[in-house]
Amino acid sequence: MSVIEGIGFHPLLSRRAGMVVYMKLHEYQAKELFGQAGLPVPRGQVCSDVTQAVLAADKFGWPVAIKAQVHAGGRGKGGGVRLAANREEARQAAEAILGMRLVTAQTGGRELVVHRILVEEGAAIQDELYLSILPDRATASLVIIASTEGGMNIEEVAEKNPEKIVRVRVNPLLGLQPCHQRQVAFGLGLTGALFKSFCSLLARLYATVIGNDLLLAEINPLVLTENGEFLLLDAKVEVDSSALFRHGELADLHDPAEMDPLEAEAQQYGLNYIRLGGNIGTMVNGAGLAMATMDLIKQAGGEPANFLDVGGGANAAMIENGFRIILSDGGVRAILINIFGGILRCDVLAEGVVAAARATGLSLPVVVRMEGTNVDKGRRILADSGLELVSAVDLRDAAEKIATIARSL
Ligand code: GDP
Ligand code: MN
């Protein structure tokens, strides 16, 4: 994740499973957005082949920075950012980065194939700062996070030298006031002309966050050049998906190639699926119940592999699709199904589970907790199916059973 881990909240669970779903922009798209807002960004061009990249580099003069465009940070450390001092180096860098499978601390163990690179005029860096703006749920405010220690080791700074991180909260109803700007600028130890230019930069960035419904604007590094100017050298942006209806131009920037392939498939089926990395697959109806289920699995000492809300109106086909997606995650060792039968009746669920188990040749242990409409009929279908399913009396029992099973594997 992009925001300094551990500073605010767990970015994955509290934001994604909290159903505040966001859309990430690529760096070049974010810089275009910021450039249009009058923020200082380097000149650059996005390229998808080597020849085009060399031509672009020629235009900017030397050195140029060549940067992988993927939806993850940590590219510098992973070999996805290179400086080139001449045409030959630019060619080599473009050849090395285009098509590479980039794994960084932020790709969650996945390899991201680089389809595009950003070729950018090089900056003469004097100082690397950190600046981000994002909502803080706990205080229902926007928080500005800044540090003089920007650059590739910001996570380490946050952990070992938290005093070097400045945080200023802004009530979104009152908006960014001059006192907030000064607080951040003082926190960064700025004086004189830099103090002033930083304050106006911050004001523009804040206005861009509000104007575009961004859930994250992270500039790392915000550099101070040798000419004494600020420059947004990197830019990470997440847009609130629920607000995309009023930002058609941002919605068009969606890049499905960057999505987790299973999440993309689930989206096609209309399923709300988020991969989490544990070994207990979960299938639940309703986002709130799904979150409670994951909490209980964690409390019982287990690790959920995914969040999957099949929705209140799910049918047997959707259950089967959900099953297929859970099973496509190679890390899943056991499955917990937790359904409260309301609109989705328990007998329909049971039929879906049985059909899916047969169709997929299921061999993993499955714990089922079912309550609600037609529950007896549902239980009978499961019992008569000949499948080895463990049934649970309630949610806590289900979580404990599945965690015990997962531990024993
Ligand atoms: P990230 O690793 O994915 O966050 O990628 P960044 O865009 O932040 O780049 C990583 C590092 O590369 C930055 O912290 C800079 O130190 C360096 N870098 C990027 N662009 C330039 C540039 O134009 N000139 C110089 N000298 N360094 C650069
Ligand atoms: Mn960066």
Image (tube, rainbow, N blue to C red):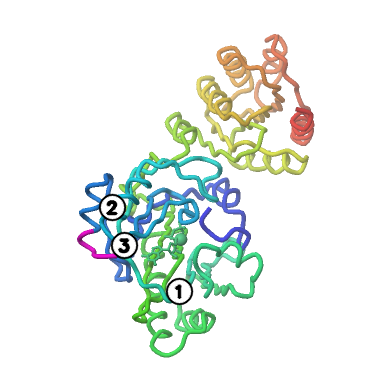
Ligand 1 appears in which quadrant? Answer: bottom left
User: Which residue has dot 3 on it?
Assistant: 85
Asked if residue 242 shows in the view, the reply is no
Q: Is residue 127 left or right of residue 155?
A: left
Q: Is residue 313 magenta?
A: no
Specify few, some or many for label 1: CA neighbours under 10 Å numbering under 14, 14-19, or 20 or more.
Answer: some
- The residue range painted magenta reads 58-62
Specify few, some or many for label 3: CA neighbours under 10 Å numbering under 14, 14-19, or 20 or more.
Answer: some
- Between discs 2 and 3, the one toward the N terminus: 2
- Between discs 1 and 2, the one toward the N terminus: 2
User: Which residue has dot 1 on it?
Assistant: 175
The residues tagged by marks 1 and 2 sit, at their Cα atoms, a distance apart of 34 Å
- Between discs 3 and 1, the one toward the N terminus: 3
Q: In terms of secondary structure, where does tag 1 sit?
A: loop
Front disc: 3 or 1: 3
Q: In terms of secondary structure, where does tag 3 sit?
A: loop
Q: Is mark 1 within 8 Å of ligand 2?
A: no
The residues tagged by marks 3 and 1 sit, at their Cα atoms, a distance apart of 44 Å
User: Which residue has dot 2 on it?
Assistant: 46
Indicate whether 339 appears above or below 251.
above
Identify the amino acid type marked 1. Gly
Indicate the position of residue 333 as horizontal and vertical percent values: 67, 27
The residues tagged by marks 2 and 3 sit, at their Cα atoms, a distance apart of 19 Å
Specify few, some or many for label 2: CA neighbours under 10 Å numbering under 14, 14-19, or 20 or more.
Answer: many
* Residue appearing at x 62%, y 15% in the figure: 354
* Residue appearing at x 70%, y 9% in the figure: 386
Indicate whether 77 appears above or below 401.
below
